[in-house]
């Protein structure tokens, strides 16, 4: 379980700023205290700009609140730990990729089932990215390359109700014995060619 807060981490890092010779020792301490292999789940809601322009921010926040009521129980039921919720993003940490993927699939099914009961502009369209790797897991945040990749996949690349897995996430899923039918793709993200997989 994460035991260091973001502010505590920053105070540790400040030591290497004050004394550059301690940088290697500080880095070892940070990884010892905060390092963990984790699946990172990031979801974003499609339609923020369009709905806000059309109906105003209160209408979109109502959609976000409905999404929160649907997503949160599912994410937690599959063993996810809420790292943080920012705007219309849900960021969760999982010990296993298979649990993050199971949560994502249930979310896609649950939100699709609501469509018949809602007007088009009130429907929930999550876009989901999942990464896996060694990260710095804090009580109130998480940092790492696969955190960034998961965020970019969920926020910028995934379409409505699409589940995208980073290359390491798919490899780990296979190691966990949970195969998945996925289409390989690639995208330039921040000047880096990133290979990922869209779950069918």
Image (cartoon, rainbow, N blue to C red):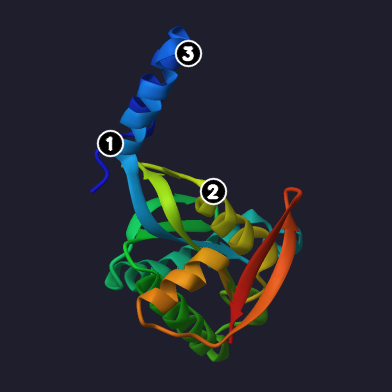
Mark 2 crowd level (few <14, some 14–19, many ≥20, 10 Å Cα): some
Q: Earlier in the sequence, mark 3 or mark 2?
A: 3
**What kind of element bears circle 1?**
helix
Label 1 sits on residue:
33
Q: Are marks 3 and 2 in contact (CB under 8 Å)?
A: no
Whole-number angstrom distance, CA of label 1 to CA of label 3 = 19 Å
Give the crowd class for mark 3: few <14, some 14-19, many >=20 residues within 10 Å: few
Q: Would residue 161 be seen by someone viewing this image from the given angle? A: no
Q: Quadrant of the C terminus?
A: bottom right
Q: Is residue 5 above or below residue 49?
A: above
Q: Residue at x 47, y 12 (%)?
A: 20
Q: Secondary structure at mark 2?
A: helix
Q: Which residue is mark 3?
A: 17
x and y, in percent, of residue 71 in the image: 42, 70
Which percent across, then down, holds residue 197?
Answer: 61, 75
Which residue is depicted at the point 73% across and 63% down? Answer: 187
Nearest the eye: 67 or 178:
178
First-in-chain label (2 vs 1): 1
Q: Nearer the viewer, residue 107 or 68?
A: 107
- Distance in Å between CA atoms under marks 2 and 1: 18 Å
Percent x, y for residue 173? 42, 75
Towards the viewer: 8 or 82: 8
Q: Which circle marks residue 145 in the picture? A: 2
Q: How many marks?
A: 3
């Amino acid at each position: 379980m994460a035991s260091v807060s973001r502010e505590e981490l920053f105070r540790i890092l400040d030591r290497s700023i004050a004394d550059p010779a301690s940088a290697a020792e500080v880095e070892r301490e940070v990884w010892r205290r905060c390092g963990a292999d984790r699946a990172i789940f990031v979801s974003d809601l499609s339609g923020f700009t369009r709905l806000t322009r059309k109906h105003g921010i209160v209408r979109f926040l109502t959609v976000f609140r409905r999404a929160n009521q649907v997503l949160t129980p599912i994410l937690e039921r599959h063993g996810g730990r809420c790292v943080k919720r920012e705007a219309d993003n849900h960021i969760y940490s999982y010990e296993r990729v298979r649990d993050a993927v199971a949560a994502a699939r249930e979310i896609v099914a649950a939100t699709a089932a609501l469509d018949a009961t809602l007007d088009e502009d009130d429907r929930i369209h999550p876009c989901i990215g999942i990464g896996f790797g060694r990260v710095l897991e804090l009580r109130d945040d998480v940092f790492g390359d696969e955190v960034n990749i998961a965020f970019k996949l969920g926020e910028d690349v995934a379409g409505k109700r699409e589940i995208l897995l980073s290359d390491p996430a798919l490899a780990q899923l296979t190691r966990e014995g949970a195969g998945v039918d996925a289409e390989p793709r690639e995208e330039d993200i921040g000047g880096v060619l990133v290979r990922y997989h869209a779950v069918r």
